[in-house]
Image: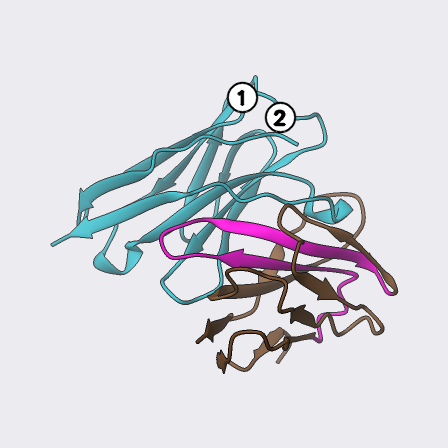
Chain colours: A cyan, B brown
């Protein structure tokens, strides 16, 4: 299983773009990269998933270089409500393998 | 609405008692998971199940037990053998099969043992 490494914490201000990078040097050919958001006392919520290049949805973008050994979650124009913990996961949910969460990145947004 | 329901949201038990946490899903997902989360920490996998009547241990299975008698249900029992049971417990489910997919999480059960 690919292990992920991401910053423990990040700070930013409202209206800024925030980029959180995740390192996954041992990613396997069939692995997808998935990002989750978690607010205190709630279950994680799916944000975005990708395999290569760039994926964009209504809340975020995911950039994955050609070697797939890292990925960057980009949150445009953050607000106070984006303060949360963000987890990067690598694996195949579809195979019901041992999906492991790392410690995540605690993002704090200031006014 | 489809989703995962965990109950109860808060649970208090005396030390030495077994307690069972409920997890039900109506998403028709084959796979289900149980995670434990301690304050300020990430999620740790307790057990997971790919199919009815089958389940595997995760990284911290000691002191816990599960059953998967129905596709919709994956209850977790915290036994008296679990040394530090006070934690936030999360259940999730996902589709099994090739291709991209995502996991859906319940809202969690906060267990406090006194």
Q: Which residues are magenta?
A: B25-52
The residue at the far right in this view is B53
Say left or right for A56 vs A106.
Answer: right
Is disc 1 in contact with disc 2, using a CB cutoff of under 8 Å?
Answer: yes
**Which residue carries the number 2 mark?**
A27
Residue drawn 70% across and 72% down? B75
Quick one: label 1, few (<14), some, or many (20+) residues within 10 Å? Answer: some
Residue B54, quarter of the rendered image: bottom right
Residue drawn 43% across and 56% down? B38
Residue A58 x, y percent position in the rendering: 43, 53
Task: Tell me the distance, in whole angstroms, between the alpha carbons under discs 1 and 2.
Answer: 7 Å
Quick one: label 2, few (<14), some, or many (20+) residues within 10 Å? Answer: many
Between B87 and B109, the one nearer to me in the picture:
B87
Please give the chain letter of the residue carrying mark 2.
Answer: A
Between B47 and B100, the one nearer to me in the picture:
B47
Residue A39 x, y percent position in the rendering: 37, 61
Q: Secondary structure at mark 2?
A: loop
């Amino acid at each position: 299983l690919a292990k992920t490494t991401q910053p423990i914490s990040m700070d930013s201000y409202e209206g800024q773009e925030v980029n959180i990078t995740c390192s996954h040097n041992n990613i396997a050919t069939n692995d997808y990269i998935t990002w989750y958001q978690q607010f205190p006392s709630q279950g994680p919520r799916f944000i975005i998933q990708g395999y290569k290049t760039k994926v964009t949805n209504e809340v975020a973008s995911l950039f994955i270089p050609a070697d797939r050994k890292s990925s960057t979650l980009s949150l445009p124009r953050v607000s106070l409500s984006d303060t949360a913990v963000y987890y990067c996961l690598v694996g195949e949910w579809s195979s019901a393998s041992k999906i492991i969460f790392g410690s995540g990145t605690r993002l704090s947004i200031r006014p | 609405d489809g989703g995962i329901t965990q109950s109860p949201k808060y649970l208090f038990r005396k030390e030495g008692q077994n307690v069972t946490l409920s997890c039900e899903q109506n998403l028709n997902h084959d796979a289900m998971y149980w995670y434990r989360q301690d304050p300020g920490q990430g999620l740790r996998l307790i057990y997971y199940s790919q199919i009815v009547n089958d389940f595997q241990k995760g990284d911290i299975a000691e002191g816990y037990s599960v059953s998967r008698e129905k596709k919709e249900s994956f209850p977790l029992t915290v036994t008296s053998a679990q040394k530090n049971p006070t934690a936030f417990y999360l259940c999730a489910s996902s589709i099994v099969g090739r291709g991209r997919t995502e996991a859906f999480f319940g809202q969690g059960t906060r267990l406090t043992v006194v």
